[in-house]
Amino acid sequence: MKKLVFLLLMFVSVTACYAGHIAGGEIYYRYLGAGGGANTFRYEITLRLFRECNPPAGNVGTQIAPMPLNVTIGIFNNASPFAIVTSNDVARNIIQEVNLTQPGPCITNAPQVCYQVGYYTYTTDLPASASGYVLSFQTCCRTNGINNISGNSIGATYTAEIPPTAGIGAINNSSAVFALKDTTLVCQNLQFTLDFSASDTDNDSLVYSFCAAYNGGAALDASPRVPSNPIYGNISYAPFASGAQPLGPEVSINPNTGIISGTAPSAGSYVINVCVAEYRRGRLLTIHRKDFTLKIGNCSITEARLPQPGYPTLCKSNSFTFENLSSSSNITSYSWQFFDPRSGKDTSSSPTPTHTYSDTGVYKVKLTVTSQSGCVDSSTSLVYVFPGFNANFNINGSCILNPYNFTDQTNAVYGVVNKWRWEFGDQFTTADSSILKNPAYRYNALGQYPVRLIASSSRGCTDTTTKVINVLDRPFLRLPFTDTLICSIDTLSLRAEGTGVFSWTPGYNIIQSNSANPLVYPKITTEYVVTLNDNGCTTRDTVKVNVLDFITVNAGNDTSICRGDIVNLQPVTQGLQFSWSPGNGLSNPLTRNPLANITTTTSYLLSVNLGNCQAKDSVTIKVVPYPSAVALGDTAICFGSSTQLSATISASSFAWSPATSLQNSRSLTPVADPTVTTNYILTVFDTLGCPKPGYDTVVVRVVPRVRAFAGADTVVAANQPLQLNATGGTVYRWSPAFGLNNPNINNPIATLGPEIGTIRYVVQVGVPEGCATTDDINVRVFKTGPDLFIPTAFSPNNDGKNDILKPIAVGLRSLEFFRVYNRWGQLVYTTSEIGKGWNGKLAGVDQASGTFVFYAQAIDYLGNPVIKKGTVVLIR
């Protein structure tokens, strides 16, 4: 693309007292020759300061300083205790203003970029010195609003170093000078490059790096002052940044060219300090520094950017999903061309299209993007399509004594495998790698090691595979059994598993003693030892063959079980082959310990063999029924009531549980009076041979206590409907029925005439199970119509009399609001709940005696509003 170079600023500014203003600075010097006095040298020293043309304001009332007319530059010995040699007040020689030229049509939301550059130059003579000098300028305050440092208006120190001019290593030097570039545009979250190189009149070699910026030392304002002695402290960086990474990990500086590049962070101002090391004939002379503030804009650049040719290389499949590597936000359309006409879909307008190539080969791909303003940019690259590349390898090795051999088995359908990178996973050394095709490696410690192969092909494909090997101290050897029995007239096949050469000892009654599976026919008990040799690594194990002339068997003792239970047969014998008869009810009649699931008494005959040796025995399993119990009386009772249980059993004994809420729990007809729903379990036992009890359960459900509530006592206007509302159950009966529209519901409407003064209604509340209780409510009848009654005074002194100011609602359905204001119109209390009121406090503080204004509105049962306004006196 025609790279629209990016949007940033190297800003600097200088402030008045206690004000943020400086955006950057640099001290450099030029060696002029011998000085006017004996054994002195003359230097031209320049401080270059940067200031934003329109720096951001700090706190309210803080002045933003202009570029200073005068500065103070200090010169110190460059050795402890860094004593000051001289200081000079220097007037400003030049001030210039640099503005960003027109950024171009492909940039959206380009910011206005302008900064001032001030030069302060003077000449001084310095005595020859074996330690050299440090030149220093300090100010209190950087420009405001910097993103990558902690705090605001943190000061700055700008320095330069003059190398030793006396003694061993004395040298005359002019410092490097950073070039003054045009303002550079950097947009947030986009890639950029920034040329921050320097020049050196002595032609010294220059090496660039990011380094921490200095703070302002003891400087408290922007007025000229003698700088403090070295050594200088660093500024405090924000958590995401540091001196070595001032813009985060996505931005770096080229040590040879001074080019800063990467992906810019979010918009804002960032302090960057660049150090350039001067080398002459391999010797480090000085480290020169420049501190500046980079301003990143909230802008976007129309850009098409694709990877370098050869990436991607498609080595697994023919498909790839493309995307624009630029994160430009002002792009409105995309046009992709894949130059693969045989695919049937050679173009796409998607931002991230997926294309499947029709064949292998090298293809060109082109992306063209268009912005909202009509700016067009394009980029091309190459895609290598060579699928079918898979890395693989084999491992051959036995133990730690010998090397392991690794054989490449990588498959390349296109091209040839031409590069190998082996990593043997040995954490005890850094020399555990190889680039050979089929390497060997010897491990020095036992354990598991992840071996990784990275293979590449002549077509540019790369693939990685990893396998874990277990390095042993001996070859792998496994015996399926290490202790066995045979009959003295039989022959037994021994078995071993492993890789290598086998040998068995002793040679007593053994056939094929050098095989993995020899035959043995000992007449007495013998231990056979097998040795496995794998390329010099050996291991061994032992098999003990116990020889018997005959065997015995005990099928077990006769036993009884409860009908429906399962029993595990447990014979005792030396035999290894089993046969139970009959097989009815057995899980497997050919196993040693089958499960028997039978309903009738059964005798089993067991035949066991050890080769040709045989023995027999039998066992009888008696089946006995469980004792039975039938418990009756499932019911529901009211809280505080009781009920009688009953049961019939076929057993020798019984017990009820829990017994704590039973009367006469040792009988089959106890009386239960639980307070909560309870499961009563009847457990029965017998002496007929079934060792397990029988059970049955009775559930007595306790209906919770009915908690009747008729409502709070109330008042009503004559002939005004009153909605009653009882709770606590599902069945209701009111008495007397006088004035009620329906006495058999929970919420009847009462209409009472002026002849009634006070009436007491009693409601019986019940549930379907028949449980019930009562409550009452007193209704006082006012002769007036619906109204709100509000006292004219109250005394919140906690004496229990007239402590709360609250409205009394007569014949009203709801209270819309009740509000109280003080004499300044401030709302001190509000509620919409009938029965609530003001306690004379505001925010927990007692209000003084005086007059307050109230405003209330309610709704009567006909939907008509009732409004009351007035004053009330608070008396303390």
Image: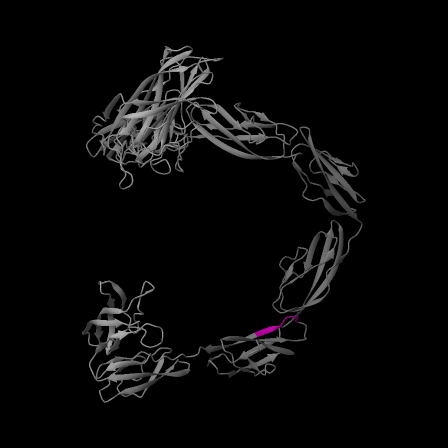
Q: Is residue 717 magenta?
A: no
The residue at the point 39 percent across, 37 percent down is 238
- Majority secondary structure of the magenta segment? loop
Segment colored magenta: 690-695
Q: Quadrant of the C terminus?
A: bottom left
> In the rendered view, does 813 fall on the left or right side of 680?
left
Judge whether 32 appears above or below 797 on screen: above
Q: Quadrant of the N terminus?
A: top left
Out of 154 and 303, give the one closest to the viewer: 154
Q: In the image, residue 300 lies at what x, y percent? A: 26, 33
Query: Quadrant of the rendered structure where residue 143 is?
Result: top left
Q: In the image, residue 831 lies at what x, y percent? A: 28, 68
The residue at the point 81 percent across, 44 percent down is 524
**Can the viewer see residue 225 in this picture?**
yes
Judge whether 718 appears above or below 603 on screen: below
Out of 747 and 581, give the one closest to the viewer: 747
> In the rendered view, does 109 fall on the left or right side of 705?
left
Q: In the image, residue 70 lies at what x, y percent? A: 29, 25
Judge whether 565 appears above or below 633 on screen: above
